[in-house]
């Protein structure tokens, strides 16, 4: 049964923020330092943990706002801010002003929509743009098992869809090139290889990050009946391959930093 947006927001707060998002947030914290930016926007702040932590580190006279079209996540984030008495406004109203720095979580932006997303966040900045996302080389272990799953279920004619998913994940060079064409300069990047580990295939397939946030996108090319079969078979194949070993997959977590080219794109 499909979950409501409210249920997904709670799952994101309980599971995704604390295992997935935190790794990208730490990459940001270790590799980016604010200078004199006073007006800052955080795009796709999720349920707010990282934005609230940043607000505590910023000067008192700095302003931090957060935008996301996920209204239910914004409600959770704003409740945290109000309880902690931290001055951050979480809104789903698209901003119509510019900021000294724009920070963006691009983790769940579809690769086919990345150019449009980057265009939007770059347009919102007067100076700095910082964003993070998985880049090429991520999820390889999962895609390998997905291909094997399709083979075992006599769905190999759809195997090209797995190849498409792999090819769509952008390389670091492609993301930097795209950002440059859209108006950034002095672009730099840093990448960490993050390891996600699960006790077995069942734990993997039932993890909210996988079953509620990643697989729905990856398996869009299947019917609902086929999706159910793939989920069940995928867990069995993982366990059959790894035996008593845990299942791991890697993600190339990448941070991109650039300056707005005020002379135009």
Image (spheres, rainbow, N blue to C red):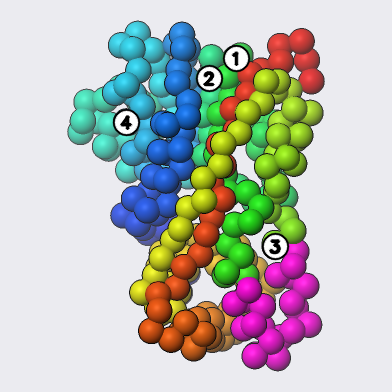
**Label 3: which residue?**
165
Q: Earlier in the sequence, mark 3 or mark 4?
A: 4
**Label 2: which residue?**
101
Image check: 94 left or right of 197?
A: right
User: Looking at the picture, how far across and down is residue 247, in whole percent?
Assistant: 45, 73
Q: Disc 4 vs disc 1: Cβ atoms closer than 8 Å? A: no
- Image quadrant containing the N terminus: bottom left
Q: Earlier in the sequence, mark 2 or mark 1?
A: 2
Look at the numbered disc 3 and give the secondary structure of its residue: helix
Q: Dot 2: few (<14), some (14–19), or many (≥20) neighbours within 10 Å?
A: many
Does the magenta run of residues contain 201?
A: no
Q: Disc 2 vs disc 1: Cβ atoms closer than 8 Å? A: yes
Look at the numbered disc 4 and give the secondary structure of its residue: helix
**Label 1: which residue?**
127
Residue occupying the point 64% across, 90% down = 152
Q: Main secondary structure of the magenta part?
A: helix
Whether residue 95 is visible here, answered yes or no, is: no
Whether residue 36 is visible here, answered yes or no, is: yes
- Image quadrant containing the C terminus: top right
- Based on the displayed image, in which of its 4 quarters is residue 261 positioned? top right
Distance CA(mark 1)–CA(mark 3): 33 Å
Look at the numbered disc 1 and give the secondary structure of its residue: strand
Q: Earlier in the sequence, mark 3 or mark 2?
A: 2
Q: Earlier in the sequence, mark 1 or mark 3?
A: 1
Image check: 30 left or right of 227?
A: left
- Based on the displayed image, in which of its 4 quarters is residue 259 positioned? top right
Q: Earlier in the sequence, mark 2 or mark 4?
A: 4
Distance CA(mark 3)–CA(mark 4): 34 Å
Query: What residue range appears in magenta?
Result: 144-165
**Label 4: which residue?**
53
Q: Which mark is residue 113?
A: none
Distance CA(mark 2)–CA(mark 4): 16 Å
């Amino acid at each position: 049964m499909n979950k409501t947006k409210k249920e997904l927001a709670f799952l994101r707060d309980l599971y995704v923020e604390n295992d997935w998002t935190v790794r990208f947030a730490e990459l940001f914290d270790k590799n980016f330092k604010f200078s004199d930016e006073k007006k800052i926007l955080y795009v796709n702040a999720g349920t707010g943990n990282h934005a609230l932590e940043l607000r505590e580190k910023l000067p008192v006279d700095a302003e931090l706002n957060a935008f996301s079209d996920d209204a239910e996540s914004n409600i959770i984030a704003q409740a945290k801010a109000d309880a902690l008495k931290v001055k951050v406004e979480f809104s789903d109203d698209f901003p119509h002003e510019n900021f000294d720095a724009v920070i963006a979580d691009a983790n769940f932006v579809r690769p086919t929509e990345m150019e449009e997303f980057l265009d939007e966040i770059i347009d919102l900045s007067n100076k700095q743009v910082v964003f993070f996302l998985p880049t090429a080389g991520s999820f390889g272990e999962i895609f390998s098992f997905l291909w094997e799953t399709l083979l075992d279920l006599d769905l190999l004619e759809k195997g090209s869809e797995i190849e498409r998913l792999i090819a769509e994940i952008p390389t670091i060079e492609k993301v930097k090139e795209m950002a440059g064409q859209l108006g950034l300069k002095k672009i730099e990047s840093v990448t960490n290889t993050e390891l996600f580990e699960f006790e077995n295939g069942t734990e993997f397939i039932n993890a909210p990050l996988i079953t509620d946030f990643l697989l729905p996108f990856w398996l869009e090319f299947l019917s609902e009946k086929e999706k159910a079969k793939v989920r069940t078979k995928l867990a069995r194949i993982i366990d059959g391959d790894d035996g008593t070993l845990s299942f791991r997959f890697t993600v190339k977590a990448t941070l991109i930093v650039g300056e707005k080219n005020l002379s135009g794109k």
